[in-house]
Image: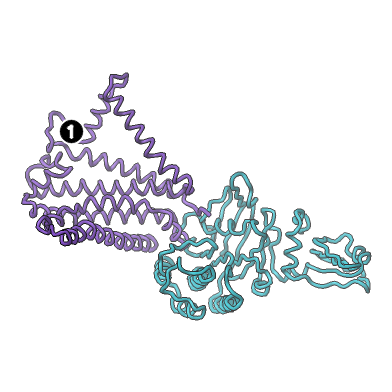
Chain colours: A cyan, B purple
């Protein structure tokens, strides 16, 4: 049981946004979907949820198409930046309609979350600030009985307190009812400890697809005097560099050579996800560095 | 009916009922209450007839306009439904089911109103009332049984309402695919082009021309139910009903085709 994307290509006005993309999203996992602005993250999520048609390729859930299919579409929910609700509708009514269409909507939890976030459900959607619109959409996403929840910029406009609260609720909700979450965000540091698996989208393709621990096990920062670092990292997959005075930091993605002795002047440290992402996606030739 | 289709149909029906209620409330206020208040304020109360104002409301005509407009509203509901995992196909089917059901209900209400309120208030018999409607071309074809003629009149109107609704759906689906700019251009261009087409047609029918429109006129007469030497009242209502049904199928197909193309604009 999984969502499968096969050979997805998306072009807008002759410009390629996604190029022959293949992806599997498995059940009961928390994924991070990372990419720079305009990388195609939202487009990808909109294709999965059948809001956009890919130029070519297929999206399926358990082998059944996601195109115009109530059965499969009803098993996923996309909370997106775009406001899909009518501005005049009251929040209570929107909850009612979500419950009507999805069934088994957790109203008690929705009411509880609204109280925690300080959201008045008698308000109209159009009267909410950006932050509270996000909060409302998050509440729906956490309470809807779908097996695959996609969160596109889930903390847009949220203050630090509300972001903390959301991450905590996400963990609690996942613990109580394991299901798949795919989180697309620019705040990598905030979700780094939350996600099990990461997709990095760059240059129209998925350049990294793997478990966070496996990926970070292959990401290093090697620092020391310029000559020593250069000598030690020669032949390795260097994805970025920093210089400060005579000190150089080379960022390496891939296995180090076990038989190569580490000079005393050189230190080897792990990279965090954000630093890895920045270095992988910084240069135009980044894709060439990815194994 | 599948659970999802039933849920969407129910949602759309409740939405439509609410809008319909508001529309009739507005009509009542605008055409009954306000004239009454105006008559009171200007001292012309003797010229105001509450009964005749109420019986002249034309609730069927209002519903026709209502169903054309509301069925054309497409994109907002599409956004809501796709957000909630409802397919385009189910949305379109639910809309058509809703149109058929609501039109049927409103045609019954409209007929009851016409024959139990308006006709007696005007001092007309049921048959005399039929003679004042569009159906007067056909209201003797099925014989002299008033009940049968009223049923024919209701079926005629019901199909007409469905046709109007499907036309609204087709227009709405096409417009929902256009950008705001393209939509505004279309709203301006279509009436202008329509005007020029009318001018062209009227010129060709009044001046000697190379066009022979006799065939077209005969075909239109045929579609309207005209047959050899038939007098108005004795035209065959089956033909316009069939014509409207064919129109319904065409409009429904257009609406369905473009509905399948709906996608997020941003």
Q: Is residue A201 above or below residue B233?
A: below
Chain letter, disc 1 residue: B
Q: Number of callouts in the render?
A: 1
Residue indicated by mark 1: B226
Q: Position of residue A50 (x, y in %)?
A: 51, 56
Q: Position of residue B241 (x, y in %)?
A: 23, 42
Q: In this rendering, would A204 be left or right of A263?
A: left
Residue depicted at x 24% and y 59%: B24
Q: Quarter of the image for the C terminus of chain A: give it.
A: bottom right
Q: Residue at x 23, y 28 (%)?
A: B218
Asked if residue B96 shows in the view, the reply is yes
Front one among A251 and B6: A251
| Image quadrant containing the N terminus of chain A | bottom right
**Residue pictured at 67% horizontal, 61% vertical:** A35
Residue B242: % across, % down = 25, 40
x, y percentage for residue A98?
43, 67
Furthest residue to the front?
B42
Query: Is residue A27 visible in the rendered structure shown here?
Result: no
């Amino acid at each position: 049981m999984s969502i499968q994307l096969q050979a997805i290509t998306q072009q807008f006005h002759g410009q390629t946004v996604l190029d022959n993309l293949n992806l599997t999203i498995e059940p009961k996992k928390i994924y991070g979907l990372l990419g720079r602005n305009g990388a195609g993250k939202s487009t990808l999520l909109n294709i999965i949820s059948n809001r956009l048609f890919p130029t070519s390729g297929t999206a399926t859930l358990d082998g059944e198409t996601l195109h115009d299919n109530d059965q499969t579409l009803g098993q996923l929910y996309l909370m997106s930046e775009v406001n899909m609700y009518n501005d005049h509708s009251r929040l209570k009514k929107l909850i009612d309609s979500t419950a009507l269409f999805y069934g088994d909507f957790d109203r008690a939890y929705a009411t509880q979350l609204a109280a925690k976030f300080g959201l008045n459900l008698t308000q109209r959607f159009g009267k909410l600030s950006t932050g509270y619109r996000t909060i409302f959409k998050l509440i729906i996403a956490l309470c809807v009985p779908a097996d695959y929840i996609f969160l596109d910029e889930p903390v847009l406009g949220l203050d630090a307190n509300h972001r903390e609260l959301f991450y905590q609720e996400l963990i609690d909700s996942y613990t109580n009812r394991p299901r798949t979450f795919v989180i697309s965000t620019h705040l990598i540091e905030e979700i780094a400890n939350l996600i099990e698996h990461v997709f990095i989208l760059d240059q129209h393709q998925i350049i990294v697809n793997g478990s966070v621990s496996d990926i970070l096990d292959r990401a290093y920062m090697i620092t020391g005097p310029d000559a020593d670092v250069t000598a030690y990292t020669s032949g390795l997959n260097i994805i970025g560099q920093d210089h400060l005075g005579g000190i150089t930091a080379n960022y390496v993605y891939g296995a180090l050579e076990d038989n190569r002795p580490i000079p005393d002047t050189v230190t080897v440290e792990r990279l965090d996800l954000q630093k890895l992402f920045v270095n992988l996606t910084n240069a135009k030739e980044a894709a060439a560095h990815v194994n | 009916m599948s659970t999802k289709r039933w849920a969407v149909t129910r949602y759309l029906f409740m939405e439509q009922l609410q809008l319909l209620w508001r529309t009739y409330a507005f009509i009542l206020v605008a055409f009954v209450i306000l004239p009454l208040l105006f008559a009171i304020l200007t001292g012309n109360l003797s010229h105001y007839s509450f009964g005749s104002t109420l019986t002249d409301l034309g609730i069927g005509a209002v519903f026709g306009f209502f169903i054309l407009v509301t069925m054309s509203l497409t994109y907002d509901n599409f956004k809501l439904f796709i957000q909630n995992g409802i397919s385009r196909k189910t949305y379109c089917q639910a809309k058509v089911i809703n149109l058929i059901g609501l039109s049927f209900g409103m045609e019954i209400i409209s007929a009851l109103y016409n024959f139990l309120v308006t006709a007696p208030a005007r001092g007309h018999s049921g048959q005399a009332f039929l003679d004042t409607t569009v159906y007067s071309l056909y209201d003797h074809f099925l014989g002299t049984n008033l009940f049968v003629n009223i049923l024919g009149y209701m079926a005629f109107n019901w199909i007409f309402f469905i046709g109007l609704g499907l036309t609204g759906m087709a227009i709405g689906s096409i417009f929902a695919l256009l950008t705001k700019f393209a939509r505004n251009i279309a709203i301006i261009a279509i009436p202008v082009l329509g005007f020029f087409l009318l001018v062209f047609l009227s010129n060709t029918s009044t001046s000697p021309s190379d066009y022979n429109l006799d065939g077209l006129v005969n075909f239109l007469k045929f579609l309207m139910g005209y047959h050899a030497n038939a007098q108005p009242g004795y035209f065959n209502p089956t033909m316009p009903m069939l014509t409207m049904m064919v129109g319904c199928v065409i409009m429904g197909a257009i609406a369905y085709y473009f509905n399948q193309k709906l996608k997020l604009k941003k």
